[in-house]
Image (tube, rainbow, N blue to C red):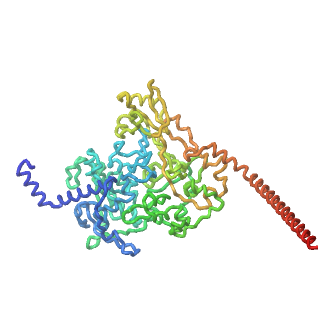
Amino acid sequence: MFKSPKTFLCILILFLLFPEISKSQTSDSISNQSDSLAIDSTKTITEVIEYKIGDISDGNKSVPVHLIKLYDYNGFSIHKNDEFKIPFSIKNTCGDCHTYDLIKSGTHFSIDTKDSTARSSEPYLYMNYRSLTLLPLSYRGSGGTISPDSVGMAPFQFLKYFGSHITGGNITENEEKETEENFFRWQVSGKLEINCFVCHDADPEYDQAEFANQINHENYKWASAASTSLANVIGYSSKMPDNYDPYNSYTYVDVDRRSYPEPQINYDEERFDNENKVFFDLKKDVDNESCLFCHTTTDNTTTDRFINEQKDVHIAAGMKCVDCHKNDINHKIIEGYQNEYADKNNEHLKSFSCEGCHIQAEESSLAGRYGAPNPLHEGIPAIHFDKLSCAVCHSSFIPEEETKMVKTSRAHKLGVPGPNKMPFTFPLIQSPVYVKNESGKIEPHNLVWPSYWARKLGEKVSPLESSFVKANIQPLLKLDTVSNYGEWPEISEEILRRTLDTLNLKSSDDEKIVFISGGKIFQLNAENSLESESSEFANPYTWPIAHNVRPAQQSLGVKGCDDCHSLNSDFYSSEVKVISSINNQSVSKIEMTEFEGLNKYYQSIFSFSFYFRPFLKLVLLFSTFTIILVVFSFILSGTKSVATYFHNLSEQQNEVEK
């Protein structure tokens, strides 16, 4: 095994002097194994979870005092007088009382796990202006999304793009999914463990924007500590060489430390007590503001949005997001959609949907949570509840002639200093778009149009790797995003044709490079001319929304049937813009009925009938009155005939008796 006795002797001495090395390797291998099991949903975890003291409540509703010791990534305690300051590890610090592997299976941390339901969710939108690329990315496998792996985006890059609105765990820790070329960068930046403080830090000085700033500098190992009021972090892992070692200054001797200092952390030593314990002001019930940092959707088309936009009616009433979106120690968040109880085989989830909470049902004994009113919906035909979700009438924005452009926290980096604050900053997300969901009900969605370069082989279309696009396509387009700041650049069909022509010179006859944008796939034909056609690979991606919930007085239908059933009803005729990277393609629009799966001509005729309904009501009343008179006259006539019959019969009997 060893080439010389000297080699064996050196290794033996190292293990005797530094036993923590072997322990670290063992713990790392166990950690890697558990990470692998968490990601591969086809494997069955038979290991019995051993709960820790912080996992199970004894029933007391108060929050325990968190006066605890800090532990670093090797499991050693941190002292305030330590000469060399290193960031504390949440996995080892919080994990001293809570089962870390159990928590990281939760909804926010398992973003790299396939979703067993057919329900779509908000994607991570990757954009590259210079290559006209907009990709809806997701590891969950929702139809219409693209896996980051398929475009060559390793977890390290995924975290760099989207880490500002990621809570850590799994994908950001699992080395098995990392590519070899990022191995050394991963060692420099460290892993991004679950940041418990995102939700549970009650300190008003907690700063999620600083967490995002540290992610931008690739200070993954330092980010969670930097977001708290306990520590201050400076420096840039992104500027350090691949062999950077904080214990050895020779590994970064060539770095200009005046501009790019190495990552350094300084603790507020006054926060440490005599036992080197630190108090954290933690909360169990998460504040709405913590949720809204990542889950905000705001109107993007008006300067009066702060006046016009209304709070969700539940928040306005004093409720918290976690009142409905609950979880236990495994941190699997209740989403609250109607069929969640069936998808997750849990009857208790029925009362957490709109219908389950507000409408009393025999099988739902928990309806009416927090005093939820029971709407009567008087005069509304029952078919509406079979065809429409509650969110259609009560959630999102009221439909207008054109769909609104909105911004979301994740797509537009809301809450992070620096990103463009101009109204029409890409990506252009449209809302609400009424879409028929997997259950056959219409519900409001957000919508975005993908734009990307792909390889077409037969009928199969697969996106090109982002590195290939940057190296080979971006230089051909020569797009100047400085003068186009905040707006999505467009190219002419001729530029697209020349670009595809150049790219296809090296392609085989069976394989072609194509461009997908605005619902179409653009490719060169046999005559080397540009042609386009609709394709399922170019379809817009949509995901359901349920907030903000409007009060009943602002719901659709409150003004009568004409809210929806009129010839110019925005519910059916609202126009969805086609966002394309080709400058003469972005003028087309699609009517809402196409997304609703309805026939617009039938709906027009049906809506037209409502103009005659007042007259028909009068006709119906007159006809009813006429029928009543006829029936009454027949009754009188019949009564008279019966009376005459008995009168004649009585006279006949009298004559017989005489």
Does residue 440 show up? yes
Left or right of 203 in this view: 28? left
Does residue 255 show up? no
Q: Position of residue 642 (x, y in %)?
A: 85, 65
Q: Position of residue 577 (x, y in %)?
A: 55, 42
Q: Along the line of sight, which residue is nearer the eye, 307 or 503?
A: 503
What residue lies at 25% left-to-right and 67% top-to-bottom? 79
User: Residue 91: which quarter of the image?
Assistant: bottom left
Q: Along the line of sight, which residue is nearer the eye, 183 or 360?
A: 360
How many numbered marks, from 0 up? 0
What residue lies at 37% left-to-right and 69% top-to-bottom? 281
User: Residue 152: which quarter of the image?
Assistant: top left
Which quadrant is home to the C terminus?
Answer: bottom right
Q: Position of residue 198 (x, y in %)?
A: 39, 61
Q: Is residue 629 above or below residue 66?
A: above
What residue lies at 23% left-to-right and 56% top-to-bottom? 29
Q: Is residue 133 above or below residue 253?
A: above
What residue lies at 53% left-to-right and 34% top-to-bottom? 584
Left or right of 27 in this view: 315? right
Q: Position of residue 168 (x, y in %)?
A: 35, 56
Q: Along the line of sight, which residue is nearer the eye, 509 or 550?
A: 509
Check the image and name the residue furthest to the left.
5
Left or right of 593 in this view: 500? left
Check the image and name the residue furthest to the right.
658
Q: Along the line of sight, which residue is nearer the eye, 573 or 451?
A: 573
Q: Is residue 647 above or below residue 34?
A: below
Check the image and name the residue furthest to the top.
527
